[in-house]
Image (tube, grey):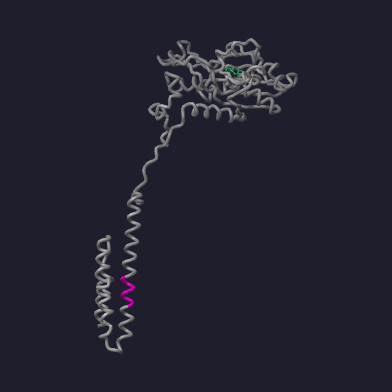
Amino acid sequence: MLERVENLKSQVEATSLTNKEEAEIFRLQYLSKKGAIQELFKAFREVPADQKKAFGAALNTLKDLAEVKHKEALEELESAAVVGENGDLTRPGQPQELGAIHPINAIKDEIVDIFKRIGFNVSEGPEVEDDWHNFTALNFPEEHPARDMQDTFFVQRNPDWALRTHTSSVQVRAMENNQPPIRTISPGRVFRNEAISSRSHCIFHQIEGLYIDKDVSFADLKQVLMYFAKEFFGKAKIRMRPSYFPFTEPSAEVDVYWGLENEIDYKITKGTGWLEVMGCGMVDPNVLRASGIDPEIYTGYAFGMGIERIAMNRYQIPDIRLFTENDKRFLEQFKTGL
Ligand code: DAH
C-alpha cells in the first residue's frame, strides 16, 4: 500500500502544469473527491493496523504536496496573465524620442555663456512692464513714437502697463536693485506691434548687457564687443557707427566684419561684408540718475541685440516665423545627436 502512495507521489512530482487546462486536469486526477488521493484515503481501512500510522503520514504528505503544487501553478499562471496584459516586462524598452533645443535658446545660451566667462551675471525682468522701466527711466521723451499705440502693446485695463518693447527695461531694474559694480546680461522675450512678415514678428528675443562701475569708458565697451565678436562669430574685426538711442550717449551700431568670400556672404551682408549685430552706447547720465546711481561717481555702458536675427544668420533660416510655428520638421533639424 505504501508503495502506491510513493508511486503517486512520483507521478505528482513529474507532472508539469503549464496552463490552466493542465492544472484542472491535475486537480481532477489527484485532488477531487474521486481523485487518486481520495481513493487512497478510502483504502485506509484496508491497511493493516501496524502500518496505518506510516501510511497515513505518507498520504498526508502526498496530499499537501499535490495541493501546494496546484495552488502555486495557478498563482503563477495568474501573474503571467497580468504580465501579458501589461506587455512583456522582459522586452527591451521603447526608445524615447528626445526633443531638440530650440535654436533661439541655443543662441541665447551661447551668448550668455560668453559673457558669464568674463564676470557678467544673468538677470531677468517682467514681460509686462510699466511705463517707467520700459520708457521713462530710459530717457524716452514723453512724445517718443515708440510709446505710440502702433508700436507698443498696452494692457487695456491699465495703460501704464505694456508688454515690454525691449530688454533695456531690465537695465533699470538692475540699477535700482544693485549697487555698482554691476555686470549683468538680461535675455528675454520682447513684444512689438508690427506687421508679421518673413523678417519681422510681434514676439522676439533680445539680450541686454550692462556694465556700471567707476571709470568705465567707451574703450571698455569696444573691448568687450571685440571679445564677443571673436568668441561668438569667430571674427576679429568690428566697427561702430554713430547712432541714436534715448538711453545712451554716445550711441553706436555695431557691425562685425563678416567677409565677402562667396555668394552667401554677399547675401548675409547685403554686399557690404559687414554684419549688423547690435546697438550700444554709454549709459546716459539721465538713466543712471533715474535708476538711483550717481552719474558723478559712476559711468557705464550698455548694449542690446536681437537673438532671432543672429540665429537666422547662424543657421541660414530664411523666415523669422519659423521660430514660433512649432513645426517639428523645422525643430528636429536642431537635434544635437544625444
Ligand atoms: N533697446 C534697443 C532696441 O530695442 C537695443 C539697444 C540699443 C539696447 C542700445 C542697448 C543699447 O542697451 O545701448 O533696439
* Residue in front for this viewpoint, 83 or 155: 155
Q: Position of residue 142 (x, y in %)?
A: 66, 12
Quadrant of res 286: top right
Quadrant of res 288: top right
Q: Position of residue 240 (x, y in %)?
A: 58, 14
Which quarter of the rendering shows the N terminus? bottom left
Magenta portion: prevailing SS class: helix
Say which residue appears at 34% left-offset and 49% top-offset.
87
Let me know if residue 240 is in the magenta part: no
* Residue in front for this viewpoint, 47 or 311: 47
Q: Position of residue 112 (x, y in %)?
A: 56, 28
Q: Which residues are magenta?
A: 60-66
| Location of ligand 1 given as a quarter of the image | top right
* Residue ranking furthest to the front: 33
Q: Position of residue 196 (x, y in %)?
A: 47, 16
Say which residue appears at 33% left-offset and 85% top-offset.
53
* Residue in front for this viewpoint, 270 or 166: 166
**Residue 64 in the image: above or below residue 253:** below
Q: Is residue 213 left or right of residue 163?
A: right
Q: Is residue 267 left or right of residue 180?
A: left
Give the number of callouts. Answer: 0
Q: Is residue 183 left or right of residue 275?
A: right
Q: Is residue 265 left or right of residue 49?
A: right
